[in-house]
Amino acid sequence: MINIGVLGTGMVGKAIATKLIQLGYNVMMGSRTATNEKAMAWVAEHGSLAQTGTFADTATFGELIFNCTKGEITLDVFKAIPKESLDGKTIIDLSNALDYSHGMPPVLNAAYCNTYSLGEAIQALLPQANVVKSLNIITADGMVNPQKCGQDLTMFMSGNNAEAKAEVEELLLQFGWQDIIDLGDITTARGTEMMLPVWLRIYGQLKSPYFGFKIAR
């Protein structure tokens, strides 16, 4: 099993890292400090396959990286990591560029909407890495257990590198996704990132995050 790094200690990072441990991967959860309280508690709960480190430690450790940081800090996190530690690696980007300054529900940051996306911004910042956008359109639990949110849901991928997308598809299958659509290069992340405002408004009406999208064809 490969080593996988998970950047972020929130609900998304914990859900992804825990599922990876259950699948038998060696996982490091990364944060600003190697002694982050949430990360340390997660390590204590999950035993020998679990480790904690700084963002930079995690980027070096992982042969594949999940970006589970909040969208408003994502680029700052990657700017603080030495680029060479991410060269050639697949980065699965789950982040969304949400702006909470106008209250709830949040809106998309106008800088990453219509003609650009956060996935593209990460790829531009890390040209030697292979960014794949996926899993950003569903609640954290549903990312690793789609059946919890409905029957035979659809998940999308966007990225420039075919081999990286094949890696991501294999993990999605292990998470329980069966209907996976490759949308094309990283510019197509604009579409899936703009699905978040729709998801948030459905959430507001249903009063539950346990739902997802299905493409009927």
Image (cartoon, rainbow, N blue to C red):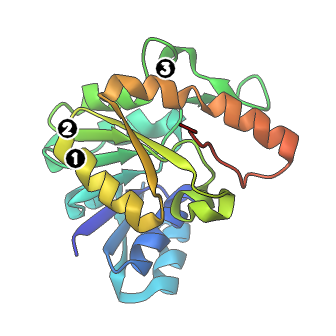
Figure check: 189 above or below 179? above
Q: Tag 3 or tag 2, which sits nearer the N-term?
A: 3
Identify which residue is drawn at 80% across, 52% down. Answer: 208
Separation of residues labelled 1 and 3 (CA atoms)? 23 Å
Q: Amino acid at mark 3?
A: Tyr
Pointers 1 and 2 in contact (CB under 8 A)? yes
Pointers 2 and 3 in contact (CB under 8 A)? no
Separation of residues labelled 2 and 3 (CA atoms)? 21 Å
Query: How many residues crowd mark 1 within 10 Å: few (<14), some (14–19), many (20+)?
Result: many
Pointers 1 and 3 in contact (CB under 8 A)? no
Identify which residue is drawn at 57% across, 25% down. Answer: 194
Disc 3 target residue:
112
Query: How many residues crowd mark 3 within 10 Å: few (<14), some (14–19), many (20+)?
Result: some
Label 2 sits on a secondary structure element that is: loop
Residue 199 at least partly seen: yes
Q: Looking at the picture, how far across and down is residue 31, in whole percent?
A: 43, 57
Q: Looking at the picture, how far across and down is residue 180, in whole percent?
A: 42, 47
Identify which residue is drawn at 47% across, 63% down. Answer: 16
Figure check: 40 above or below 204? below
Disc 2 target residue:
161
Separation of residues labelled 1 and 2 (CA atoms)? 5 Å
Farthest top residue in view = 115
Q: Looking at the picture, how far across and down is residue 156, in whole percent?
A: 44, 41
Q: Tag 3 or tag 1, which sits nearer the N-term?
A: 3
